Amino acid sequence: MNAAVMVRGLHKAFGQKQVLRGVDLTIAKGELLGLVGPNGTGKSTLLRALIGLVQADAGAITVLGRDPRQASLAIRQHCCYLPGETGIYQQLTGAQFLHFALGFYPHHDQARRELLLRAFDLPLHQKVRSYSAGMKQKLALLATLIPDVDLYVLDEPDRALDASVRFCLREVLLAMKQQGKTILLSSHHLNEVEALADRLQFMLDGAFVATTELDAARAILRRRPRLRLRQGEALPSGARELQRDPNGTLVVETDGDPMAWIRSLPDGIVESAEIGIPRLEDLYQTLYASRPRGDA
């Protein structure tokens, strides 16, 4: 395989806490890989290790043909990294920060630059300290996506963005993928990542979840529809309530096919229903619950 990233047996601990546990990962050139997982599961540590910001305790990493422990600067000259917690110089204007950040890269994609500048519509003449969290994230995205490099490592790029901006970002990333750019994308928005990525990797407790385990969790969730009943109605037989959200939405588990159960209900009793759309939080709760107690 013509790989942009290869990771083998990666381990990393901070003190007594084991953060990465034997991670193996291969990303092909031109692939957009989605990395998903709850906070604290090791995603950000893995991304930082790829560009040499974190030194692994054991294992091997190759990024764009180089070892980040020996050639992190060379890797970063051909890679753009967006950290999960964006730090921007508050005393600069947006334009000054952008000029500074883009100065590290000799080649820029001018068409992408113009598209993003129009879409984000930032007041670049103002000091960054006056920006909202969403505006700062847009500025960081400009600094990350305008350079024309081989690899983009994006940790929660849709953080603090509203739905319309997330849609624009998705279209830009799809266009970059079509240009042959390699993208590693970490996000909590499971449905949006699935729409973007060529492949997903789920991380839990510092390791990737096996495909068989993930398929089993998805199969369980397919039998657990979310629905809202008409006010005053009790849950009909054939299903058990597992969870009740503050807005009145129920998560239930049906005895058989959930679609058949919902079709069998009296007309008008169900105000809304959602089937077969796994939420990231539900997926990981199911994975945790299905593991033996004490299993890491």
Image (spheres, rainbow, N blue to C red):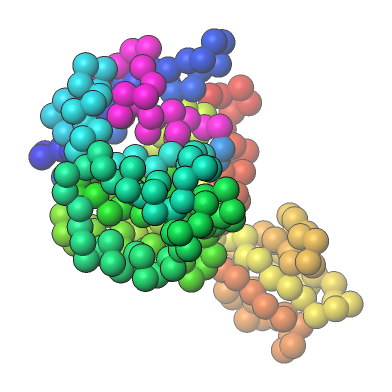
Examine the rendered structure and indicate whether residue 81 appears above or below residue 242. above
Q: Is residue 195 left or right of residue 13?
A: left
Examine the rendered structure and indicate whether residue 19 appears above or below residue 152. above
The reply to whether residue 190 is in sight is: no
Give the percent coordinates (x, y) of residue 170: 37, 63
Q: Quadrant of residue 153?
A: top left
Q: Quadrant of residue 227?
A: bottom right
Give the percent coordinates (x, y) of residue 221: 56, 56
Residue name at image x 58 percent, y 60 percent: 223
- Quadrant placement of the N terminus: top left
Give the percent coordinates (x, y) of residue 234: 85, 72
The reply to whether residue 108 is in sight is: yes
Q: In terms of depth relative to the viewer, which is nearer, 7 or 217?
A: 7
Tell me which segment is drawn in magenta: 40-62
Residue name at image x 45 percent, y 35 percent: 43
In magenta segment, residue 43: yes
Examine the rendered structure and indicate whether residue 4 appears above or below residue 23. below
What is the tally of numbered marks visible in this picture? Answer: 0
Give the percent coordinates (x, y) of residue 201: 38, 43
Q: In terms of depth relative to the viewer, which is nearer, 192 or 233?
A: 192
Q: Is residue 98 left or right of residue 65?
A: right
Residue name at image x 32 percent, y 48 percent: 99
